[in-house]
Image (tube, helix red, strand yellow):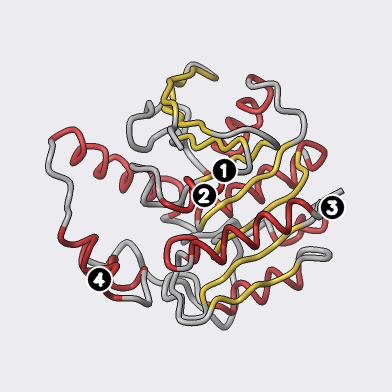
Amino acid sequence: MQFEESYITVDDCRIRMRRAGTGQTILYLHGANGAPVIQPFMQELAQDFNLLVPEHPGFGYSDEPPWLENIHDLAYFYLDFLKHQKLDSVHVIGSSMGGWLAMEMAVREPSRFKSLVLIDAAGVPLPDAQPGDIFLWSAEQMARNLFYDQTLADRVLANPPTSEQDKDALLKNKHTVARLAWQPRLHDPFLSKWLHRLDMPVKLAWGKDDKVMPLAFGQALKKLIPGATLDIYEACGHLPQVEHPARFCASVKSFIEGVR
């Protein structure tokens, strides 16, 4: 499946977007590592859906706007993005920080969303559990802690960015993540009390061995979001869509096809 690349401008911010496929629209919201390449699970989803993969403001090859100060700014940007793209009702998949972003968007304008799939999502605090400290881990520690399957970590570590442009994009990602999630660390202290507004179908996908957002966070979100279901992926770290792409895509397809 060939993805088309384009740049669009919303709120005076130019962002990079990849798009492929036909059918119902899925907006994929990436996590802290950005979306530098099209992954196999994206190729698979595009076989059945119209898949949009933007790079957030402040990430990758998108602009770094001066107005971007917190996760709420990013949520309002994407609500404007949906309006700009004339997407009145859309399915959203959000990974990690992208899952947090999806929740911030959906509590504000729930009517815009047909469903949410939240993958190992950040966003809420827990008194008895802490996320991994991604700001202190070295590049190798980060790669190791993302995956249960260490051959995937080896592959990431064996292919670091080489061009100056790619290196700059990686540094920009880190800067933006710090801006959005440094303090309070990887959560919005007020989000939990508004999650009852998520009246659309919600599926949580979680790696049992996640070292970034431990499974306790998924179990807590299941209780906080009305009617949410939780799929736990055995032998899996922070990225089920990467470690178990076939199961993940089949689950998403079945879930979306069941949404009325």
Q: Kindly report the distance in space between the C-alpha atoms of the residues bearing marks 2 and 4.
A: 29 Å
Of callouts 4 and 3, which one flags the residue occurring earlier in the amino acid sequence? 4
Q: Kindly report the distance in space between the C-alpha atoms of the residues bearing marks 3 and 2.
A: 28 Å
> Label 2 belongs to which residue?
44
Of callouts 3 and 2, which one flags the residue occurring earlier in the amino acid sequence? 2
**Rendering coords of residue 126 (x, y %):** 60, 74
Q: What element carries label 1?
A: loop
Q: Which of marks 3 and 2 is in front?
A: 2
Decide if residue 190 is on the left or right side of residue 34: right
Q: What element carries label 4?
A: helix
Decide if residue 242 is on the left or right side of residue 24: left
Q: On screen, 14 above or below 143?
A: above
Q: Kindly report the distance in space between the C-alpha atoms of the residues bearing marks 1 and 2.
A: 5 Å
Residue displayed at 52% across by 55% down: 95
> Label 1 belongs to which residue?
47
Q: Residue 108 carries which label?
A: none
Instruction: Say if mark 4 contacts mark 3, CB within 8 Å.
Output: no
Q: What element carries label 3?
A: loop
Of callouts 2 and 4, which one flags the residue occurring earlier in the amino acid sequence? 2
Nearer-the-camera pick, 171 or 30: 30
Nearer-the-camera pick, 11 or 119: 119
Instruction: Say if mark 1 contacts mark 2, CB within 8 Å.
Output: yes
Q: Looking at numbered disc 1 in the image, what kind of residue is underneath it?
A: Gln
Of callouts 3 and 1, which one flags the residue occurring earlier in the amino acid sequence? 1
> Label 3 belongs to which residue?
199
Instruction: Say if mark 3 contacts mark 2, CB within 8 Å.
Output: no
Q: Kindly report the distance in space between the C-alpha atoms of the residues bearing marks 3 and 1.
A: 28 Å
Q: Looking at numbered disc 3 in the image, what kind of residue is underneath it?
A: Asp
Q: On screen, 185 above or below 73?
A: below
Q: Looking at numbered disc 4 in the image, what kind of residue is underneath it?
A: Gln
Of callouts 1 and 4, which one flags the residue occurring earlier in the amino acid sequence? 1
Count of marks placed on residues: 4
